[in-house]
Amino acid sequence: MRQRRGLAPLLVAAALATLIGCGSGDSRFATTTTASSTATEQTTAAMPSGMAAPTTTSPTPTPTPTTTTSPTSTSTSTTMPTTAPSTPPTSVAADASSYPHAAEALWFLALDNVAASISVHREGSEPWSAAVGRRVDGRVVTGGTPFVVASVSKLVTMLSIARLVEQGDLTVADPVPWSAMGLAHDPAWDGVTVRELLDHTSGMPINRKSWLDDPGPCSVPLTEALAEPPTEGRGRWVYSNGNYCALGLLVEHATGLALDDAAYALVFDPAGVAGPYLTTDGLRDDSAPSPRGIARLARLGGAGTWMMSTDDLAAMLADVTDADLEVLRWPGIILDQYGWGHTGTVDGAKACAWVIEDGRTTVAAVVSGPEPATGGDVCDAVVPALALDLGRYAGEPRRDPV
């Protein structure tokens, strides 16, 4: 796997220095838990050379309410401020003692953004989340606040396909039924399989601009792409939103349901998740602001049009089964030494959703704003930081495919 330089060394070192020097109790940092989590493996795994081990307890600070004024907005507003308030608001007192390094990583990620959130689900522990910023309606962001998750939406589409396979409604080795789906296409696409779409090996052209910036549903650029034969890249991994636009349409075709209704029936309801919605519904008042707006994301369809909270993402991944993993496999999902997941990157939003400890732990982190550059950078910050908390630090993530 290729080495990818990211934020992990800086943020992990800074988190350790801050925690050791002054504790993790910043009253601007909001954390929420359903009950007191017990972290039994928080101390000293293999530590980076030159770093001291973190302390195992954190002081519980007194909450300090802020008077930051939130911009007014309606549920259809798409123009929001692009900088975070100097003192981000909080929902409850900070308590980062369960996952102090993950909490500190989120704080660094939030500094230049409007809002940020992280959630952790771990087998045997209570769900934990932390958040910074204000929602569209001016209330504080929590782990249950929907954010733009961009290409992390592909995990929802993958899981929808996996559940259809498990029900016997689809087979990944079958050719994609383009004609039955109402999609005109060059005959060379007739042999392309569902597996090739899942793995980004179908020969789908990239055309990043057409999948974002023009109006209309994703079927419009998909039809344009299908008018020509698959590219010469067929058979090797070439990441294209078109593959997951097509898979989203396939889910609708196989179920007879709209994309969101199908996802609820197949993925969200079984996981006990009730908050996700599509960007086509408009930006709700209970969601995080989106500096670049969300109307343009409708173009992505199953490739990137979900609004989800980190709580819901972590819970969804915690519900993944061994049978699902027969469908969710590399290179459709991304692997590193910690586990697997997906990242999301669009202007104004970055997201990371990861499964570690062989499925025992799931983590989701999102930011609304300009920094960092990619969802991979978000993963670089939070995954190794959480691994430190779990006593499983294994260096900077080495992600494949990048």
Image (cartoon, rainbow, N blue to C red):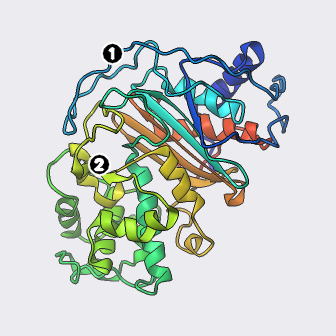
Residue type, numbered disc 2: Arg
Asked if residue 205 lies left or right of residue 375, the reply is left
Q: Is residue 87 above or below residue 195?
A: above
Asked if residue 307 lies left or right of residue 181, the reply is right
Residue type, numbered disc 1: Thr
Q: Is residue 140 above or below residue 352?
A: above
Determine if residue 368 is in view.
yes
Q: Where does label 2 land, which residue?
A: 208
From the top left corner, tell me how far across and down residue 23 is, in percent: 72, 18
Quarter of the figure with residue 196: bottom left
From the top left corner, tell me how far across and down residue 191 is, in percent: 34, 82
Q: Residue at x 58, y 70 (%)?
A: 325
Quarter of the figure with residue 396: top right
Assess disc 1: are there few (<14), some (14-19) or many (≥20) residues with their C-alpha within 10 Å of its C-alpha: few
Q: Viewer-nearest of labels 2 and 1?
A: 1
From the top left corner, tell me how far across and down residue 174 is, in percent: 40, 85
Q: Residue at x 51, y 47 (%)?
A: 311
Residue 69: mark in rendering = 1
Label 1: state its secondary structure.
loop
Assess disc 2: are there few (<14), some (14-19) or many (≥20) residues with their C-alpha within 10 Å of its C-alpha: few
Asked if residue 121 lies left or right of residue 193, the reply is right
From the top left corner, tell me how far across and down residue 144 is, in percent: 46, 43
Q: Are marks 2 and 1 in contact (CB under 8 Å)?
A: no
Q: Is residue 62 above or below residue 177?
A: above
Determine if residue 200 is in view.
no
Depth order, front residue of 86/346: 86
Count the marks: how many? 2
